[in-house]
Image (spheres, rainbow, N blue to C red):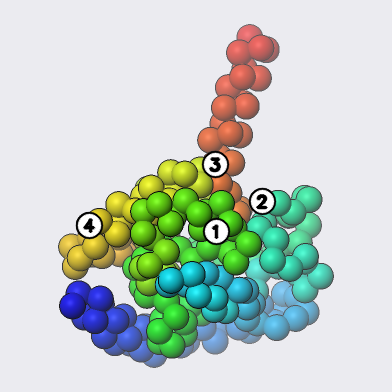
Amino acid sequence: MYLRVKRATDFILALIGLIVLSPLFLLLIIAIKIDSKGPVLFKQKRVGIHKTHFNILKFRTMRIDTPKDTPTHLLENPDQYITKMGKFLRKTSLDELPQIINILRGTMSIIGPRPALWNQYDLIEERDKYGANDMPVGLTGWAQINGRDELPIEVKAKLDGEYVEKIGFLMDVRCFFGTIFSVLKSDGVVEGGTGAKKEISATKEEEKTVKY
């Protein structure tokens, strides 16, 4: 029953959001077109509920010659592909705004496990252990406010499993407002990361130990 209420709420809030944010959409579209060549929107095949595939929508943040279907952290020198406007969009998470359209279409929810890339087999397999692949994927979720990009695959999947166990109105409210705080503080933002932030920090500490 809650999933039906959740879907109706998603549609209403997404429609209101699209109307209210339309001036911001227009400004970002103009800025993206001025900054670099290529389409405004970026489509990428992702895994939705019951492991079905759909095209997620984002504002384009990378050059059009970027290798397709490759996570950012697996690219060689990913900074060379990210546009100037793209760095701003990623840092502020504004590149995710077009997913409001995905929510209206019903391929995504506002709150839920973040949709994996179609070829992120390790994450998909881990989520199977917790039933997280049978939940509507979301614009944001429990994992996003508990580490975001810096989380290892196993931890991210386990947090998605916790969301499945505790799914309900209060849990969704916690995720919603937790996301706002995380975005404002840019908590856990590592480009395409899966534990990269912690590994970098550990490496720096080791260097300090050796040096001093």
Relative height, residue 93 to residue 159 (above, below): below
Residue 166 drawn at (x, y percent)? 22, 57
> Which amino acid type is shown beneath numbered disc 3?
Gly
> Which amino acid type is shown beneath numbered disc 2?
His
> Considering only order in the chain, which callout, 2 or 4, is on the residue closer to the N terminus?
2
Would you say residue 190 is visible in this rendering?
no
Residue at 43% x, 88% y is 105
| Measured Cα–Cα span from mark 3 to mark 2 | 10 Å
Q: Which mark is residue 91?
A: 1
- Within 10 Å of the Cα at label 1, are there few (<14), some (14-19), or many (20+) other Cα atoms? some
Image quadrant holding the C terminus, namely top right
| Measured Cα–Cα span from mark 2 to mark 1 | 15 Å
Residue 132 drawn at (x, y percent)? 38, 60
> Considering only order in the chain, which callout, 1 or 2, is on the residue closer to the N terminus?
2
3 or 1: mark nearer the eye: 3
Q: Secondary structure at mark 2?
A: helix
Q: Which residue is mark 4?
A: 166
Q: Which residue is mark 3?
A: 195
Residue 123 drawn at (x, y percent)? 52, 54
Residue at 18% x, 78% y is 1
| Measured Cα–Cα span from mark 3 to mark 1 | 18 Å
> Considering only order in the chain, which callout, 1 or 3, is on the residue closer to the N terminus?
1
In the image: residue 145, left or right of residue 210: left
Relative height, residue 85 to residue 71 (above, below): below
Q: Which mark is residue 73?
A: 2
1 or 4: mark nearer the eye: 4
Q: Are marks 3 and 4 in contact (CB under 8 Å)?
A: no
3 or 4: mark nearer the eye: 4
Relative height, residue 109 to residue 200 (above, below): below
> Which amino acid type is shown beneath numbered disc 1?
Lys
